[in-house]
């Protein structure tokens, strides 16, 4: 009986440890205020921890952005790669999720675009919390899964949204 409890505790700890390592393999780590310029290429991961506030320039060209901080960049370029957003990304420029791009808004996180357009063309968007766009969302092709909430001034496109949440258009 005692061995079963010890094995259960070890497995539980390992499972919790694996869940907490979502941003564990980082090529570049930001843990404070940062206004630098970063280009993330294939094989690289840029991680922002919970203390990070980023206002510089990010270019994602085949790499991974893992955000647990606050991103309010002066410039944001998403050419290819993956974004895992666990907290908040706020943009004032257009965001195109094109071919070879994956954008995941995790539970408890938000993507905010102000006076901008979010376009999906051949990429993938997974929304598990909030996408708020003061502007337009264009869903032209690709995969868009909404589990929670989308707020947008305008929603256009020829492709579909797999929706099990709420979509508000103003």
Image (spheres, helix red, strand yellow):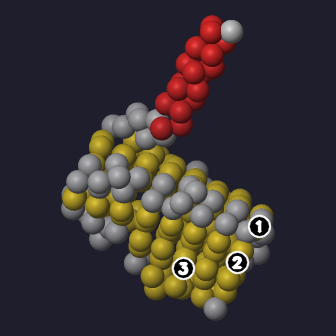
- Label 2 residue SS: strand
Q: Which mark is residue 167?
A: 2
Is the residue marked by circle 2 packed among few (<14), some (14-19), or many (20+) residues within 10 Å? some
User: What is the distance, in whole Å, between disc 1 and disc 3 at their CAs?
Assistant: 17 Å
User: Which quadrant: the C terminus?
Assistant: bottom right
Counting residues from the start of the chain, the first of labels 1 and 3 encountered is: 3
Is the residue marked by circle 3 packed among few (<14), some (14-19), or many (20+) residues within 10 Å? many
Contact check, label 1 and label 2, Cβ < 8 Å: yes
Counting residues from the start of the chain, the first of labels 3 and 2 encountered is: 3
Q: Which mark is residue 163?
A: 1
Q: Which mark is residue 133?
A: 3
Above or below residue 127? Residue 40 is above
Question: In the shown orientation, is residue 151 left or right of residue 66?
Answer: right
Residue 7 horizontal/vertical position (percent):
61, 14
Which residue shows up at 43% across the image and 65% down it? Answer: 89
- In this view, the residue in front, 33 or 17, is 17
Task: Choose mark 3 or mark 2, whichever is in front.
Answer: 2
- Label 1 residue SS: strand
């Amino acid at each position: 009986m005692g061995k079963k409890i010890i094995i259960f505790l070890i497995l539980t700890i390992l499972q919790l440890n694996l869940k907490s390592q979502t941003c564990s393999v980082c090529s570049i780590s930001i843990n404070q205020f940062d206004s630098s310029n970063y280009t993330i290429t294939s094989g690289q991961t840029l991680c922002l921890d919970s203390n990070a506030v980023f206002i510089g320039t990010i270019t994602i060209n085949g790499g991974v952005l893992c955000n647990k901080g606050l991103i309010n960049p002066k410039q944001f370029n998403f050419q290819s790669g993956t974004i895992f957003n666990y907290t908040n990304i706020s943009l004032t420029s257009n965001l195109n999720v094109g071919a070879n791009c994956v954008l995941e808004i995790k539970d408890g996180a938000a993507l905010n675009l102000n006076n901008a357009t979010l376009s999906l063309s051949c990429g993938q968007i997974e929304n598990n919390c909030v996408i708020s766009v003061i502007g337009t969302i264009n869903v032209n092709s690709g995969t868009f899964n909404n589990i929670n909430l989308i707020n947008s001034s305008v929603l256009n496109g020829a492709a579909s949204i797999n929706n099990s949440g709420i979509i508000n258009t103003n």
